[in-house]
Amino acid sequence: MKKDPFKEYIKESDPDKRDKGYAWLTAIGLQAVDGLKTSDYLIDTATRNIEGEISFDEANSLLRSYYAENPASDASDRTEEADIVSARIAAILSEKAFSFSPGEYISIHRRLFEGIYSYAGRIRDYNITKREWVLDGATVLYGSATELFATLEYDFSAERAFSYQGLSMDEIIHHLAVFVSRLWQIHIFGEGNTRTTAVFFIKYLRTLGFDVTNDIFAENAWYFRNALVRANYNDLINDVHETTAYLELFLRNLLLNEQHPLHNREMHISGILSSAEKANIDDQKANIDEMFTPKTAAHVRKLKEAFGRHTVFGRSDAQKVLGLKPTRSSELLRDMEVKGFIVPVSGQGKGKYRFL
């Protein structure tokens, strides 16, 4: 993605261009929660839409035609997903219609991922875990497959019955953080939960009178996801408590245009990271885009999400996570080692590594 291609649009006096610029900027930025990057073709298509040359339907049609003629050569290349989902998010964010209901939430997932995931718009019927970098490889306890819809309905009912009247802005921000973190924790879909939750939440915030037309989601999508994780994780033995504090900082920047620094390193649960290691976390994240091609950068992010800092892994592990062939997996690991992202681990067998 070209650097900040739509920043000027969200400063536009023309409300149509401003709103579309925000929608596209947010849609593209949200792909970062799954380590995805969009193509230059999408940027050009989005710009044409903002300028009024083509509609959202035409933009989606152009993308479908483009990928029919230019299919990915590698099954692990998810650029097409990033492009198509971005266009769909931008279209949904540009619509005025919205219903605060479980059905709307499920419908957004279906609209975003239809034709991409076979289970688009379907509630998962199996339990899941996900290794989280911010938790040093641990997982949040997501909703039980047997209770997902009932839990979803309960959260919606509780929010509908809640009154914001008489609350201070601090209290409103805290309540919104609790609501969206609980909604996300249910994780009713197999994949795509964070992007679906973000789109639904933005539209809900608008019904509450918030403008939500800045670049906070676009610039801090990974922070948003990590803040949701930290709001739903306890490890009392190690003095780690669930907290909405990080999510509230994000919301204050989003809704009140405050300027709190949003650093992912501050959320990491490990108390043993040195200052140098903490500083390197954000630096390394930025360097991924500079040191690798977009496709390889997506692979590196996915491996970091899967293995964290302490898990030892090798070529076969990379193959399973990324779906690559053995030769390509070996090449990727060598490239990551040369560029200082992983180091060999002795005593664990030949060809074993861990992230710095």
Image (cartoon, rainbow, N blue to C red):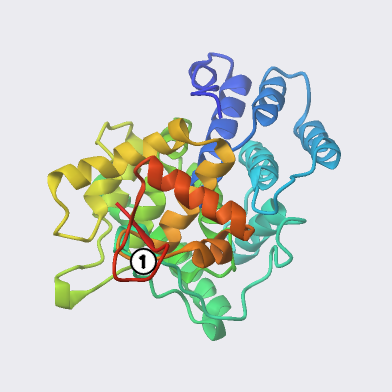
Q: In the rendered view, does 203 fall on the left or right side of 258?
A: right
| Quarter-of-image position of residue 320 | bottom right
Q: In the rendered view, does 4 fall on the left or right side of 131?
A: right
Q: In the rendered view, does 152 fall on the left or right side of 59?
A: left
Q: In the rendered view, does 25 fall on the left or right side of 259?
A: right
Of helix, strand and loop, which one carries label 1? Answer: loop
Percent across and percent down for residue 138 are: 34, 70
Percent across and percent down for residue 324 are: 62, 57
Instruction: Give the camera-side residue of 288 and 336.
Output: 336
- In this picture, is 255 found above or below 204? above
Quadrant location, the N terminus: top right
Instruction: Give the camera-side residue of 192 and 251.
Output: 192
- In this picture, is 222 found above or below 46? below
**Residue position marked by numbered label 1 in the rendering:** 312
Percent across and percent down for residue 130 are: 45, 68
- Residue 201 shows in this picture: no
Residue type at mark 1: give it: Val
Percent across and percent down for residue 77 are: 65, 48
Q: Residue at x 44, y 30 (%)?
A: 290
Instruction: Give the camera-side residue of 12 and 298.
Output: 298
Q: Residue at x 57, y 62 (%)?
A: 319
Q: Residue furthest top?
A: 13
Q: Residue furthest front?
A: 350
Q: Residue at x 25, y 36 (%)?
A: 261
| Quarter-of-image position of residue 281 | top left
| Quarter-of-image position of residue 327 | bottom right
Instruction: Give the camera-side residue of 80 and 350.
Output: 350
- Residue 273 shows in this picture: yes
Q: Residue furthest bottom?
A: 146
Q: Residue at x 30, y 46 (%)?
A: 264
Q: Residues within 10 Å of mark 1 (few under 14, many from 20)?
A: some
